[in-house]
Amino acid sequence: MMWTTLIAGLILLSAIPSGLPRSVYDVEGRSKRSIDLNDVYYSKMRQFRLPNEVTATSYHLDIKIPSIEKNEFNGHVKINLTWSNTSDRITLNIHQNLEISKVGIRMIQLPPDEAKKGAPMEVNIARKERQRFKSWYIIHLEQMLKNGSACEVTITYYGNLTTNETTGLYKSAYMDITGQKHPFIATYLQLDNAQKMFPCMDEPPYKATFKLRVSYPAIQDFKACTNTPLISRRTIDNSIEEEFEETPKMSTNQLALVISDLETIFPREDVNEIEGRKLQVKIWGRKEFLMSLTKVPDKIVKIVNYLQNYFNSSLGLPKLDVMAIPMYSASKASDNWGLMFFKESELGSPLVWTTAYELFYQWIGQSVTPYRRNDAPVNKALNSYLASMATLDLNPDEMEGKWPMTVLYSLYYEFAQTAPFSRVAGIRHEATWTKAELVFRMFNYTFGHELFQKSVRNFFHQQSKEDRRTFYANDIFTYLNDLANETNNLPPGLTINGIAASWINRDRVPLVTVIRDYETRKINLSQKVYLRDVPPQSTAKVSYQWDIPIVMQAEDNLNFHNTKPTVWLRKELVPKNLTMSDITSKDNFIIVNPEEIGMFPVNYDSCNWKMLSQYLQGPNRERILPLTRAKLLHDAWNLAYAGELCFGIAMNMTLFLKQEKSHVVWEPVFTMIHHVGRRIEGLDVNFKFEAYIQSLLKPLYLELGENPQPDEPSWKTHMRGLMQNFLCRTGYEPCIKEARDQFKKWMIDEEPDKGNPVANKFLCPVFKWGTNEEWEFGLQRVINFPKTSLARKQNERTYLLKTLAGCPKDANKIEKLLQVSVLDQNENFTDADVQLIFSMLTGSATGYKTLFNFLQEHWYTVKERFQNKTYLWDGIINSATSSFNTHEGYDMVSQLYLDHQTEFESADAIIRKALRVIKQESIKWNEENVPVIDAWLKENLSKEDLEAIAAATSISTTAVPTTTD
Ligand SMILES: *[C@@H]1O[C@H](CO)[C@@H](O)[C@H](O)[C@H]1NC(C)=O
Ligand SMILES: *[C@@H]1O[C@H](CO)[C@@H](O)[C@H](O)[C@H]1NC(C)=O
Ligand SMILES: *[C@@H]1O[C@H](CO)[C@@H](O)[C@H](O)[C@H]1NC(C)=O
Ligand SMILES: *[C@@H]1O[C@H](CO)[C@@H](O)[C@H](O)[C@H]1NC(C)=O
C-alpha cells in the first residue's frame, strides 16, 4: 500500500544477508492522484503562465464523433471571457495537434461607464497568432477593451482521438470472452491535457462553468457520461446527441467524459439526504466484470454517508458515477468531480481505505481544489489521514492495528540516518507527505477529534462559499489555528502553522529525554535531534528544535483516551529544557508520547525504564495498548543502538516478548534483530543472541502453527513468514528439512533448466545449511540458465545468484564461486553478476572474510582482470574490507593497505574510508555494546542453551553444523 512496505520487504529478504541495494524501494506509492504529486516533481511543468487580464467564465462545448473507426472528432466551443484589466488580446491554450478552422468573436458586455455612454458593442479580430512551442493561441483584437468588458469567442476545430496513449480525448477498447472488441472513448485531462480536447485556459486557478454536448454513432449501446446529469438525449439519423447539465465553476482538468457500452449497477440503499437531496450513485463496469463489483455500490454509499456527515455537506453535485475502466492499468487512477475512474482491480477490492481516500477528493480536491499544484501535497496528506481515520471507523480490522506504525517507524529509521534519503531521492517526497499526514494525526489527538473535525468543516464550508473554491496549503492549518485560538485551546505563544512547519519542513525528528528526579519530584524534559548512527566528526551538529506536545501517562492513572498535552516543549526555549512537577509518585512509571501521538522517540532515566520493563512482564501489561507497548520496546532498542541508552536496559525491555501475543508489538522486532545482527555478525556473541531470539520467538511460533489456516487474518500469515524466515536462518531444523525436501524435487528433475519448482524462500536455507552438492547444483542452474526463454525471467537467475553468494556459511562454497566467476572468467557471469556477488558477500562474516582472503591471495591477477573496470575494482576493495568489525579485522585490512599502498589507485579512498569506519564506528560500537549484550545474555539464557552454544562454537570454525543426513 505504501512505499514503506518496501522496507518491510527488505527485512523479509534479510534471510539473504545483504549489502542489498536500496533501489528495491519502489517509488510508486499509493495510488496516484488527480493532481499527481510525482508528476509535479518529475516532469517539468510548462513554465508559461497565461496572462490574467482576460479570463474565461464559461464554456459551451460540442464534441462530435462522426465514426468510431476513424479516430477523428470535431469540436465547437463557445467561451465567455471577461476583462479585469485593459487588454487587446485573448490568450488560450490549444494543443498543437488540434486544427482550427474558424474563429469568431462578439461583444456581450461593455464596462458600466461605456455602457452608460451608449458606446457601440463592437469588437473585431486583428490577427491570430499560434505559438506552438507554448501551446498558446493568441487572438489580437482591433480594439483595446477595458476592465468590465465581456466577449464570447467561438472556435470551430478538429482533431484526432489519442490512440497511442491515454491522455486528452482517447480511444481504447476491451475484449469480451468471445473475443469481440468493445471500443470506448474516455478523457484524461489531468495536469494540462484539457487543451488536447478543446481550446481553453488550461491552468487550475481559471475556473469556469461547462456545458457539454456530445454526438456519436448510434451503435453498441453506447452511452455518454460526464460530471453532471444528462438533460436530453435524442437520435438523429444514425447518431445520438446528448446534452448535460451545466457544471458549477471548475478547472479544465476536472472535466471528464466517457462514451462506452459499460453497464451500471446501483446500490441497494440510498445515500442519506443532505441539503434537500439525495446523491445518485451508480457503478459502471464491463458486463463480464460487474459480478466482481456487486459489493461496491453499498460500500460506496456507506463511505459517502460517512463523509457527508464528517463534512456536514454534500459533495456539491447531484450525482456520482464510479467507473471501473478496462485496461486502465496503463494510466493513473483519476478522479473527476462527480465521475471517478478506477482501475478494475482497485475498485473490486473489498478494502475501505483506497475507496475512502479517493472519495475524500470529491470534497477536498474537487469540490474545493488546491490553488496551484504545489498546494496539492497538503491536500494529499490530509485526505490520506482522513481516509485512515474513516477506515478505522468503518472497517477497524482492515489496518490490523498497524497504522501508523509501519509508516512511522520507516520515517524514524530514515530521518535518523546521518544523511537521510542519500540513497534514493524519490522517496523523499513520499516521506514528506507521510510526515504531513502524521502531523494531522498529531493535531487530531492534541486538540481533540471534535475540534479537528470542526476546523476541517469550517475550512471546507468557507472555501465552498468562495467564488473560486480554491485553497492554499496553509489554509488548512489556518482554520485549525483560528478555531483553537477562539476556543482557548492554542498553547500560548504558538500557532498551528508554526508548529506544523517545524515538523513538516525537516528531514529529522527530535529525541525527547525525560529525566525524573525522584528526590525533588521534578521531571526534566529536553529535546535534541534524533540520530542513530554516529555522525562523522566533520559534519556540523544540526541544532533544529521543534514544538513538541508532551502527552503523559502515569502508572496509577493509565487512560489512553487522554491525548491532550500536559505541556508543550517549545522550540524557542533557552536553555533547551523544561522542568515540571512529577505527575505521580516515585513507585510509578510514566509514559511520554503514548500511541506515538507525536513523531518522536522518548528516552527516560534508568529507574523509569526499569519500572516499565517490570510492569510489561507483569499481569497488567495489556493495560498499556499494543502500539504503546511496541513504542516502548522500539524506542529502547533503537536508543541503545544509537548509544543513548545502555543495552542492558534495552535487553530487559525485550523480556516481555515471551508472553507477547500482539502482532503489532512483534512487527518491528525483526528489523531490530536485523540491525543488531549486522553489527555482531561473525562474533561469538551472535550465537547467544540468536539463541535468545529463538527462545523469544518459539512460543508464538508454536501458537501460530506451522501452516496457514484457511481464512486466517493476513497478519498471521505475515508473522508466520517472518518467524519462519528468522528461525530458518538460525538453523531451526524443521524448517531446514522442509527446504531441503523441496529442493530435492529440483535435483531429480530431468530437465532442471526448464523451470524452478522450488519457492524462493527455500533457497537460502538450503544454500546455507545444505550440502556442497546442493549448492553446486544451484550454481550449475545459474551457469546453464537459458539466455532466451519466455518461461523464465532473468530475475529468477538473479535471485538464485544472490542466494548462492549471500547465504553460505562455509568458505569453500564462496571460494568456488569466486574461482568460477572471477578467475576462470566463465562467460556466463557478466560484470553485473560479479558486482552483485561482491555486494552480497558483505552480509556475512564468512562472505567478506573469504573475499578478503581471495583478494589477498590473487591480488595481481584480480588487479589485472579489473584493470579497465574501475567499478569492479572499487567494488571488490569495498566489499572485502568495509564490513570488518574487530581489531583483528582492522589489522588485516591495514596490513593489506601497507602491503599494496601504491597499488589501490581509484580504490585508495575506499580502503582508507573502510579503515576509518571500522575503527571509529564498528569497533567502537562493539567495544561499547558487545560486552554488555554478552553479559546480559549469559545471565538470561538457559543453561542448556549456553551449553549447546559452547559445544557448537567449538566446532563452528572447522565444520558446519548441518542437519543430520
Ligand atoms: C455568454 O454570455 C451570453 C450573455 O450572457 C449568453 O447569452 C451566452 O450563452 C454565454 N455563452 C457562454 C458560452 O456561456
Ligand atoms: C489525424 O490523423 C491523420 C492520419 O494519421 C492525419 O493525416 C491528420 O493530419 C491528423 N489530424 C490532425 C488534426 O492532427
Ligand atoms: C503519441 O503520438 C503523439 C503524436 O503523434 C506523440 O507526440 C506522442 O509522443 C505519442 N505518445 C506515445 C506514448 O508514443
Ligand atoms: C488569537 O485571537 C486573538 C483575538 O482575536 C488575536 O489577537 C490573536 O492574534 C490570535 N492569535 C493567533 C495565534 O492566531
Image (tube, rainbow, N blue to C red):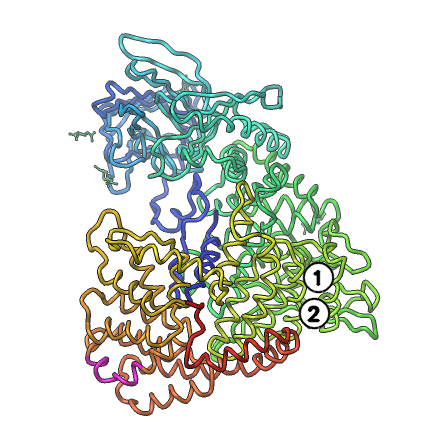
Pick whichever, 89 or 413, lies toward us: 413
Tell me where residue 304 sits by quadrant.
top right
In the picture provided, is 785 more to the left or to the right than 960? left
In the rendered image of this protein, does residue 346 appear above or below residue 700? above
The reply to whether discs 1 and 2 touch (Cβ–Cβ < 8 Å) is yes
Residue 490 lies, in percent from the top left, at 71, 51
Furthest-front residue in this view = 965
Q: Is residue 940 above or below residue 468?
A: below
The boundaries of the magenta stretch are 854-864
Quadrant in which residue 893 is drawn: bottom left
| Amino acid beneath label 1 | Val
Give x and y (percent) for residue 511. Answer: 62, 67
Quarter that holds the C terminus: bottom left
The residue at 82%/70% (across/down) is 521
Residue 34 pos. (x, y %): 43, 39
Taking the magenta stretch, the answer to whether it contains residue 434 is no
Q: Which residue is mark 1?
A: 592
Residue to which mark 2 is pinned: 604
